[in-house]
Image: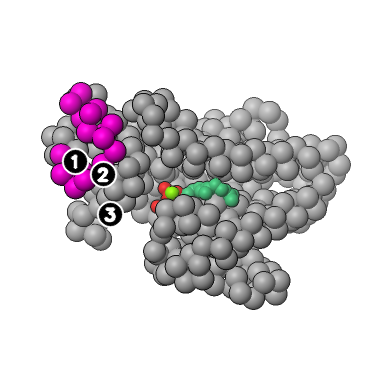
Amino acid sequence: TSAIEEPLDPFSLVSDELSAIANRLRLMVVAEVPKLALATDCFLTMGAQGKGFRAAVLLLMSKALHMPLPQLTADGVFICLKELNARHQCIAETAEMIYVAGLLHDNVLDDAETNCGMGSLNTVMGNKLSVLAGDFLLSRAFVALAKLKNTEVISLLAVVVEHLVSGETMQMTTSEERRSMEYYLQKTFYKTASLIANSCKAIAFLAGQTAEVELLAYNYGRNLGMAYQLTDDVLDFTGSSSSLGKGSLSDINKNIVTAPILFAMEEYPQLREVVDRGFGNRSDVKLALDYLHKSRGLDRTRELAAEHADEAVKAIEALPASDDEDVIKSRRALVNLTRRVITGTK
Ligand code: FPP
Ligand code: MG
Ligand code: MG
């Protein structure tokens, strides 16, 4: 048992498959649209800097739900494990493509200057090409997915795209709903957690798992995604350990209200009018930060992230028991990942 108990780098279990996916994606884009090769450099750093995070979670979920051969799939067909793995890799690849497509559009919406630590495509190649690159990746994701000939899975990921767009749209609102925690949490589910939740569900579905296991996979993804975004929203104020306690403050500067400010507003209702003015001037930003640091806003957001991480762990623990060592290792890696997510270690 000692080998099983030592801490596990969640990515190391799937690093070969991750680089295979990265290479396939890059070759595909380079062959089809050479100009877009730049856009895919993000894929090449998979496993690092949080890139490939989604694919890694999905590949680990695939292993965590591993059952003895042969498998009866949801369509009632027996397929071999090799075929199931190929289908699961397709889901991981598709999820990454949808994510990067979203990021390429997001960079245009946000006027982002960098991405993955390099000049973002919109600044290097312009907004037009960035939008088209996103469209290309999105179409390609669904071309790949369609090859699985499984309408349920296509539908799960089509809903994800709808959610991404809804989340971005909700974030753009200027009316009073942006002061509501409920609205923020719904937006966060759409923008970040739906992709992981629904693709985890697709992994379970393709493996022919019961509705119960499908729901556990979905709940793992949903809670992991929520914990990830809540932590990201804290780090936007505080910075990671490497940035000497200085956050980028990009959310508040873009007039995006996140959980830390919403919690601070509960303690200091005076913050409401500041939020309503829209952070158009620096003194309002400073005022909001003063209230935030006096309040428990950052701590309460961290606590909420930790609660979601715990829920994610519970979902993994509720999976049907297995004595297969690879299954146990993968489940431990998924549990580990929840800890990494809430400490901002990507
Ligand atoms: C990053 O958020 C943005 C997303 C995760 C989703 C973007 C989705 C769209 C623009 C809708 C269109 C979707 C598709 C699939 C074409 P962020 O700006 O908070 O994070 P950042 O700091 O990494 O930029
Ligand atoms: Mg952005
Ligand atoms: Mg954005």
Residue of label 1: 284
Q: Secondary structure at mark 2?
A: loop
Going from the N terminus, do you reach mark 2 or mark 3 first?
3
Expressed as whole percent of the image width and height from the top left, the position of residue 273 reads 23, 29
For marks 2 and 3, give the one nearer the viewer. Answer: 2
Q: Is residue 334 above or below residue 274?
A: below
Q: Secondary structure at mark 1?
A: helix
Does the magenta segment cover residue 231? no
Write the residue at 48% across / 64% down.
122
Residue of label 2: 280
Residue of label 3: 248
Ligand 1 lies under 8 Å from the Cβ of mark 3: no
Q: Is residue 140 above or below residue 217?
A: below
Q: Report how far apart the C-alphas of labels 1 and 3 lie in the structure.
A: 16 Å
Q: Report how far apart the C-alphas of labels 1 and 2 lie in the structure.
A: 7 Å
Q: How many numbered marks have been drawn onto this rendered protein structure?
A: 3
Write the residue at 41% across / 57% down.
111
Amino acid type indicated by mark 1: Asp
Q: Going by the picture, which residue comes out furthest to the right?
A: 77
Residue range corresponding to the magenta coloring: 269-287
Write the residue at 50% across / 46% down.
334
- Quarter-of-image position of residue 307: top left
Q: Report how far apart the C-alphas of labels 2 and 3 lie in the structure.
A: 17 Å
Label 1–label 2 contact, CB within 8 A: yes
Write the residue at 66% across / 60% down.
136
* Majority secondary structure in the magenta region: helix
Between 221 and 145, the one lying in front of the other is: 145
Expressed as whole percent of the image width and height from the top left, the position of residue 281 reads 21, 45
For marks 1 and 2, give the one nearer the viewer. Answer: 2
Q: Label 2 crowding class (10 Å Cα cut-off): few <14, some 14-19, many 20+? A: some
- Quarter-of-image position of residue 67: top right
